[in-house]
Image: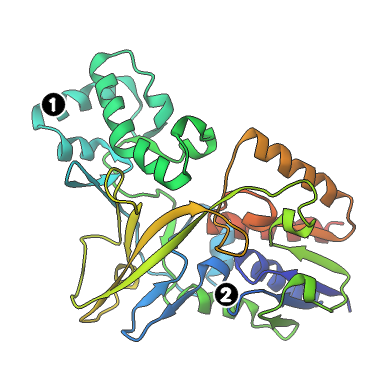
Amino acid sequence: MKTNLIVGAGFSGATIARKIAEELNEKVIVIDSKDHIAGNAYDYRDKNDIMIHKYGSHIFHTNFEDVWTFLNRFTSFNTYMHHVIAVIDGIETTIPFNLRTLYDVFPHSLAQKLETKLLTQFKYNSKVPILEFTKQKDPDLQFLADYVYEKVFLHYTSKQWGVSPDSIDGAVTARVPVYISCDTRYFQDKYQGIPLNGYTETIKRILNHPNIEVQLNTKFTDCKETYDRLFYTGSIDEFFNYKHGKLPYRSVHFKLEELNMPYYQSNSVVNYPCNYDFTRIHEYKYYLRDTSDKTVIAKEYSEDFILGKNERYYPIPSPSNEALYQKYLNEAKELKNTYFLGRLGDYKYYDMDKAIKRALDLFKEIIQQ
């Protein structure tokens, strides 16, 4: 029987582990340097019976049928659909900036005028990346573009990425659109929700197979296991001992506060684009409708990733960083029976469903070899 070593017990590692153990009937050893499974999707119930997302809010959404089918073997989901509130000029309104946002932040007559022009200029239900949206020739739409750029995008982006928006790759700015729609949801995917039993329990069930062994508090460099295949979901530059240089990441840290009140804010996530040093506040009770006389919030602060100090969260897309990643990828292609995947292994900003999809597709590649 072949032995597979998988580094990382998050969604990427757990998914590929289950597929190999179940469909190839091979031994799988999953190691993780953390003291828990589930990676950055890790959640837990606190003393108030509130489900806390330790590494920030995780909202599941997907259009991939195979991903949805796979996950529903191990959990059921509620019908939570994510909305994000932003405080703009002291007014709470939904983002991405949409047709309803117009009426929240502008006088009715001006909002109506802008809505008419937007619907003339753009297709309804279309998403226009913010930097494309700023290229308006109509003076009223240019006013709107300047307003959205400053109030929603400019300062928030500077806080989140630590640089001016001009330095941000288009792959990032495309995630901040103006939505020509009355749909106030943050995601429009067919399937959305939060696992009723939590993310940690879901991944625990994925890993629950006789052929799978999990070892926590175990670094890859300290692992003594022998293996026929290696699946590495850690940082690809760390695997190669940073021989070409370190891949840059942004990190975040969360300041948790327990408050003696049923709710602190009006929504699960409230963004503060122009105020305060934190980018947003999470209130976890909303996700599974937990009931408690108390609530827990988390203020989110962005910062640079520093090895040994904090966690890698967001790969920073740029031509120079992509070129550096390609050097490591070329090295990886020379290795036999060694595969890199996940946000850190692929140096890509994966949502959870895309991380699972990548693992499912990689498994298909392996069985065809």
Q: Using the image, tell me which numbered label, if any, was put on residue 203.
A: 2
Question: Percent position (x, y) of residue 224?
Answer: 84, 79
Q: Amino acid at mark 1?
A: Leu
Residue at (53, 62) in percent of width and height: 68
Q: How far is the residue under mark 2 from the one under mark 1?
A: 49 Å
Q: Amino acid at mark 2?
A: Ile
Counting every numbered tag in the picture gives 2
Nearer-N-terminus badge (2/1):
1
Question: Percent position (x, y) of residue 366?
Answer: 81, 59
Q: Is 254 drawn above or below residue 319 in the view shown?
A: below
Q: Tell me if label 2 and label 1 are in contact, CB under 8 Å.
A: no
Quadrant of image for the N terminus: bottom right
Residue at (20, 35) in percent of width and height: 102
Question: Percent position (x, y) of residue 358?
Answer: 66, 55
Task: Answer whether residue 234 is visible to the viewer in this image.
Answer: yes
Tell me: 23 left or right of 108.
Answer: right
SS for callout 2: helix
Asked where in the image residue 307 lies, by quadrant, the reply is bottom right
Tell me: 42 left or right of 335.
Answer: left
Q: Is 173 drawn above or below residue 45 in the view shown?
A: above
Q: Using the image, tell me which numbered label, if any, was put on residue 227.
A: none
Question: Percent position (x, y) of residue 195?
Answer: 44, 71
Q: Using the image, tell me which numbered label, if any, was put on residue 110.
A: 1
Q: Nearer the viewer, residue 171 or 163?
A: 163
Asked where in the image residue 80 lies, by quadrant, the reply is bottom left
Task: Answer whether residue 358 is visible to the viewer in this image.
Answer: no
Residue at (33, 42) in percent of width and height: 96
Tell me: 357 left or right of 137.
Answer: right
Quadrant of image for the C terminus: bottom right
Q: Is 45 drawn above or below residue 163 in the view shown?
A: below
